[in-house]
């Protein structure tokens, strides 16, 4: 497994190279990290955080499902049923059949969107686009759980199931649901990056239960962002993106795990021409995604990135950034977080692309 570490204070990225990965079917997907090290060995120094007030959240009639520790969103399906079926299937070791999701949009409110007294405001948008299934999944930890926020922080997760492979929506739902369920059970003395690496390991295990751990039998991208004590930690597998928006500019914190990266490196080494690298039909194929067995690559932050007042942290699937460029997205980041997320969704939908992909964006605004 190749692990790419982002060091928050220097914004440097270290890479441990591995063998050239085999590209997956050309489509969006997610990855599988090798088992994370047992985090208990390096406990973090803990301090007593300032107690938080309960989040102030506007009511909404749209569907939501509370899983252990947060709110879980999965497209157009009866969310509680899907999550229950997935978890029950894992426990029983049975094979899950494909579910169809038809709902076009969903907003998470209640425990999943709002403002913390600590100074974090969270919003989200989720749309099926022009696809027949909603294969994106996302979740936000419970902002109303003051103890969880104090001890562990606020966790946001986004996953994009591979539309070109079987059961992409089940893989993304399994990965997201597992991470959120496990998040509330991790000992509070683990360091934030250890928690995230462990959660990715568990999410990949859940995804492999759906796919059988075989390449090209299903998968999902997977993003996670953890904010605690004014700092950000993150993980990424696949080609979904996490951005830091600061002073009107979008700064990508993750890199896509796609075959194009390997082709370009080979061209730079003179192993093939740049023309051949650019013309390769598999350039956009994912090389790392959850559900593929052992992960080929994983981006993560080994140290927390200090957040500043006015910053935005965005988690999004390619249905957003393949339709809008960075400048367009940055220009839509104003007002409260929920309004900004919905504004991004509206701009994507208004573009009217005939094959618009599923889109999901989770926006964290630092007050």
Image (cartoon, rainbow, N blue to C red):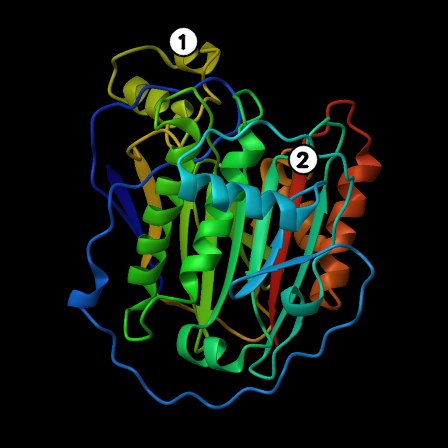
Whether residues under marks 1 and 2 lie with C-beta atoms below 8 angstroms apart, the answer is no
Disc 2 designates what residue?
Answer: 134
Disc 1 designates what residue?
Answer: 276
> Disc 1 and disc 2: Cα gap in Å?
34 Å
Q: Residue at x 31, y 31 (%)?
A: 293
Instruction: Give the x, y percent position of residue 21.
Output: 29, 23
Instruction: Give the x, y percent position of residue 208.
Output: 38, 34
Instruction: Give the x, y percent position of residue 29.
Output: 48, 31
Q: Nearer the viewer, mark 1 or mark 2?
A: 2
Image quarter in which the C terminus is found? bottom right
The residue nearer to you, when weighing 196 against 283, is 196
50 in relation to 197, above or below: below
Can the viewer see residue 240 in this picture? no
Q: Residue at x 38, y 66 (%)?
A: 185
Label placed on residue 25: none
Helix, strand or loop at disc 2? loop
Q: Quadrant of residue 352?
A: top right
108 in relation to 49, above or below: above
318 in relation to 263, above or below: below
Check disc 1: other Cα within 10 Å, few if <14, some if 14-19, many if 20+: few
Image quarter in which the N terminus is found? top left
The residue nearer to you, when weighing 81 against 203, is 81
Q: Residue furthest left?
A: 41
Dot placed on the residue nearer the N-terminal end, 1 or 2 = 2
Q: Residue at x 24, y 45 (%)?
A: 35
């Amino acid at each position: 497994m190749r692990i790419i570490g982002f060091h928050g204070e220097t914004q440097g990225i270290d890479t441990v190279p591995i063998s050239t990965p085999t590209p997956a079917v050309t489509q969006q997907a997610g990855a599988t990290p090798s088992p994370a090290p047992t985090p208990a060995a390096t406990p973090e120094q803990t301090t007593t955080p300032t107690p938080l007030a309960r989040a102030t959240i506007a009511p909404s009639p749209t569907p939501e499902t509370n899983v252990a520790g947060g709110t879980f969103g999965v497209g157009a399906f009866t969310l509680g049923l899907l999550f229950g079926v997935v978890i029950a299937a894992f426990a029983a070791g049975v094979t899950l059949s494909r579910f169809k999701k038809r709902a076009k949009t969903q907003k998470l409110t209640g425990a999943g969107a709002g403002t913390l007294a600590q100074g974090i405001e969270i919003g989200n948008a989720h749309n099926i686009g022009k696809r027949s299934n909603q294969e994106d999944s996302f979740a936000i930890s419970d902002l109303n759980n003051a103890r969880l926020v104090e001890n562990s922080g606020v966790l946001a997760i986004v996953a994009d199931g591979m539309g070109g492979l079987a059961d992409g929506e089940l893989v993304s739902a399994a990965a997201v649901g597992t991470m959120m369920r496990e998040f509330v059970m991790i000992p509070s003395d683990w360091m934030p990056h250890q928690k995230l690496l462990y959660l990715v390991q568990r999410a990949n295990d859940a995804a492999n239960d759906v796919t059988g751990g075989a390449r090209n039998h299903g998968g999902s991208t997977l993003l996670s962002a953890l904010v605690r004590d004014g700092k950000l930690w993150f993980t990424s597998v696949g080609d979904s993106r996490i951005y830091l928006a600061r002073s009107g500019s979008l700064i990508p914190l993750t890199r896509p795990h796609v075959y194009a990266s390997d082709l370009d490196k080979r061209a730079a080494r003179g192993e093939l021409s740049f023309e051949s690298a650019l013309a390769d039909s598999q350039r956009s194929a994912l090389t790392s995604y959850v559900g593929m067995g052992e992960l080929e690559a994983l981006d993560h932050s080994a140290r927390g990135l200090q957040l500043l007042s006015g910053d935005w942290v965005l988690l999004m699937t390619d249905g957003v950034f393949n339709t809008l460029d960075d400048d367009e997205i940055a220009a839509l980041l104003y007002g409260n977080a929920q309004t900004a997320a919905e504004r991004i969704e509206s701009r994507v939908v208004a573009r009217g692309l005939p094959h618009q992909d599923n889109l999901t964006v989770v926006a964290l605004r630092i007050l």
